[in-house]
Image (cartoon, rainbow, N blue to C red):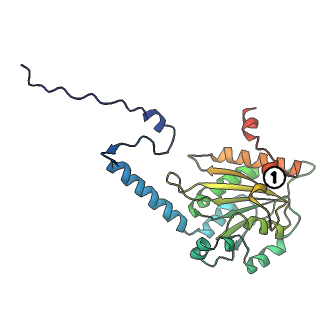
């Protein structure tokens, strides 16, 4: 009689193929009723990275240098949130310009077509890494030699800013539309995701329904080239049709296919 004990067959991993196309945590191995140790530790690490991203401080000097490579002037402003704690506890303060920042912008008002604003939002590392590459590509794609060229305002870095701070900046600069590049709320698979919010004729009471959004801008999400393409196509459509938000359908996917 043979003393060899047959080994149990390994069950096929039906989730393996899907894991290769998404960073989502799917089909996690288990130890009894709990998640296995490895995935549990990875989840705790991701959560720690997301929390750290919320509290990261934007390196404004470095970002100004990176944005300066576009050839446009770079202005620095701040919201009425005096510090990070105030910013997180009082979202309304992050939507409003500090009085001294209004004074910084006023000398540059000049009936611009578009103002680009970079705000730290809830992930400073997102705009620190992704804002300059996206803006360089978008600015290069905007027409400059047509009979009606784009008049682009100085680039603005907004510290402790929410999306709506772009409305206030555009109003002071007299820009017809504003594009706010901002750090999005960190997730457990992306602590460095950047969003772009575009608004035609922003006002103090502008609602989110009047904005167009490009979300998840990062190399592992919407890449720089795709984000710049979407950004410029939406800006062209806004200026041409004088609308934004739910009234303006995003047809960039169709345009890319064509």
Q: Which residue occupies 61% across, 50% down? A: 216
For the view shown, which residue lies furthest in the top direction?
A: 1
The answer to which of 29 and 213 lies nearer the viewer is 29
The answer to which of 258 and 22 lies nearer the viewer is 22
Q: Is residue 199 above or below residue 99?
A: above
Q: Which residue occupies 51% across, 41% down? A: 22
Q: Position of residue 59 (x, y in %)?
A: 59, 68
The answer to which of 7 and 152 lies nearer the viewer is 7
Q: Dot 1, how many residues are within 10 Å of its Cα: few (below 14), some (14-19), or many (20+)?
A: many
Q: Is residue 151 above or below residue 79?
A: above
Q: Position of residue 15 (x, y in %)?
A: 43, 35
Quarter of the rendering occupied by the N terminus? top left
Task: State the image quarter where residue 182 is shown.
Answer: bottom right
Q: Which residue occupies 74% across, 41% down? A: 252
Q: Position of residue 95 (x, y in %)?
A: 71, 70
The answer to which of 57 and 210 lies nearer the viewer is 210
Q: Which residue occupies 30% across, 46% down? A: 31
For the view shown, which residue lies furthest in the right direction?
A: 147
Quarter of the rendering occupied by the C terminus? top right
Q: Is residue 170 above or below residue 196?
A: below
For the view shown, which residue lies furthest in the left direction?
A: 1
Q: Which residue is mark 1?
A: 244
Q: Position of residue 194 (x, y in %)?
A: 62, 55
């Amino acid at each position: 009689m043979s003393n060899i004990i047959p080994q149990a067959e390994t069950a096929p991993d039906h989730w393996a193929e899907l894991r290769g196309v998404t960073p989502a945590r799917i089909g996690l191995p288990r130890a009894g009723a709990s998640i296995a140790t490895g995935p549990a530790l990875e989840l705790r690490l991701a959560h720690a990275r997301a929390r750290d991203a919320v509290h990261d401080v934007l390196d404004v000097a470095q970002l100004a240098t990176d944005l300066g490579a576009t050839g446009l002037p770079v202005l620095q402003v701040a919201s009425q949130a005096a510090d990070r704690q105030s910013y997180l506890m009082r979202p309304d303060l992050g939507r409003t310009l500090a009085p001294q920042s209004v004074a910084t912008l006023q000398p540059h008002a000049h009936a611009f077509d578009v103002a680009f604003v970079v705000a730290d939002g809830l992930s400073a590392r997102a705009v620190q890494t992704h804002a300059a590459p996206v803006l360089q590509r978008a600015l290069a794609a905007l027409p400059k030699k047509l009979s009606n060229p784009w008049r682009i305002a100085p680039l603005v870095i907004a510290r402790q800013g929410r999306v709506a701070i772009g409305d206030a900046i555009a109003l002071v600069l007299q820009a017809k539309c504003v594009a706010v590049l901002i750090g999005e709320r960190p997730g457990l698979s992306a602590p460095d995701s950047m969003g772009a919010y575009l608004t035609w004729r922003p006002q103090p009471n502008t609602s989110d329904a009047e904005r167009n959004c490009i979300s998840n801008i990062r190399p592992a999400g919407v890449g720089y080239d795709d984000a710049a393409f979407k950004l410029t196509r939406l800006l062209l459509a806004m200026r041409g049709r004088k609308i934004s938000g739910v009234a303006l359908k995003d047809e960039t996917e169709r345009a890319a296919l064509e």
